Amino acid sequence: MSATESNVPSDPPAHCPGTQSDDAGKASACAGCPNQQLCATGPKGPDPAIALVKEKLADVRNKLLVLSGKGGVGKSTVTALLSRAMAHRHLAQNFGVLDIDICGPSQPRVLGVLGEQVHQSGSGWSPVYIEDNLSLMSIGFLLGSPDDAIIWRGPKKNGMIRQFLTEVDWGQLDYLLLDTPPGTSDEHLSATTFLKGTDGLWGAVLVTTPQEVALLDVRKEISFCKKLAIPVVGVIENMTTFVCPKCTTATRIFPARSGGGAEQMCTEMEVPYLGQLPLDPRLTKCCDEGKDFITEFPDSPAVKALDAIVSKVRLFFEAEEKDHQ
């Protein structure tokens, strides 16, 4: 996404000529608009990187955005679990994770490759491999220290995402999962603009927790997807219950005020409900240590719930593929 597009107001004047018009920033309707100067001087026409992203991701069949309206709902953990589960269950397929949470990259730690470095060749950056069929790219690999802060404005973050999508040599992938920051801001708009121009299928999984404060924000995320025509694969309700690691008794610690939680919200907003994931302290420990929870605790209720969710995600893309044939 160009700097011009990323600064267009969501509610422009009624007669706004649009950023691609030769009259952008010059028409009478532009008078008083805070983006008048930006539109008048910014580049016109589609971002040339869109065609480059399409070419670079030509061998990526399915793209899956993992979104959350609120931070702290476990989006990065869910991304890692989904990618590991898919890679374990489908050894003949290839999977990739792209961490576009520029200011808070957590996938290197969660997936157990903190401190690794990416290598560059003639074909671009080589992602770091977690398994033979699972790879990861994150800005975390490019930092001098995990404690380094990234203090960037929107255009620079958008440029980094563009670079990830055009310069990483993923090879042939069946699924590319994109771990995004919370909200509906620059990173999301940039990724959406680029993915819309690619071949193959794409969609979004939304992660929430049961309490009303999280559901309020995920409703905004659903509205964001609908406005930008992002296919919604479904909603995952994380930390629905706490599972005791000794007796495996499940206790609801984040009760939904409305009673129905995420499932009821999905019915009201007409989006698929993918299921619940319990809160397991062993999972938290595995994420902190970069261990594979699925192989460490294969009989965990969380792993069983995860398998059902992965099946629904794959069914969505298989159905979409049939519809496009």
Image (spheres, helix red, strand yellow):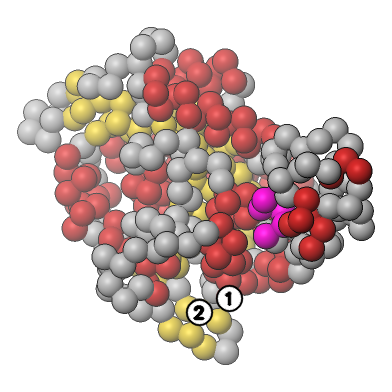
Using the numbered discs, state the Cα–Cα distance from disc 2 to disc 1 in whole angstroms: 6 Å
Tell me where residue 145 sits by quadrant: bottom left
- 117 above or below 64? below
Q: Residue at 41% of width from left, 49% of height from top?
A: 79
On residue 167, the disc is 1
Q: Amino acid at mark 2?
A: Trp
In the image, residue 299 lies at what x, y percent?
22, 40
- 69 above or below 155? above
Q: Residues within 10 Å of mark 2 (few under 14, many from 20)?
A: some
Can residue 270 be found in the magenta stretch?
no
User: The magenta stretch spans which residues?
Assistant: 3-8
On residue 125, the disc is 2
Local secondary structure at mark 2: strand
Local secondary structure at mark 1: helix
Q: Residues within 10 Å of mark 1 (few under 14, many from 20)?
A: some
In the image, residue 84 lies at what x, y percent?
37, 54
Count how many numbered circles sit on residues in the image.
2
Q: Residue at 24% of width from left, 34% of height from top?
A: 279
Q: Residue at 61% of width from left, 44% of height from top?
A: 203
In the image, residue 40 lies at what x, y percent?
82, 58
Q: Residue at 30% of width from left, 40% of height from top?
A: 303
Tell me where residue 43 sits by quadrant: bottom right
Residue 171 in view (yes/no): no
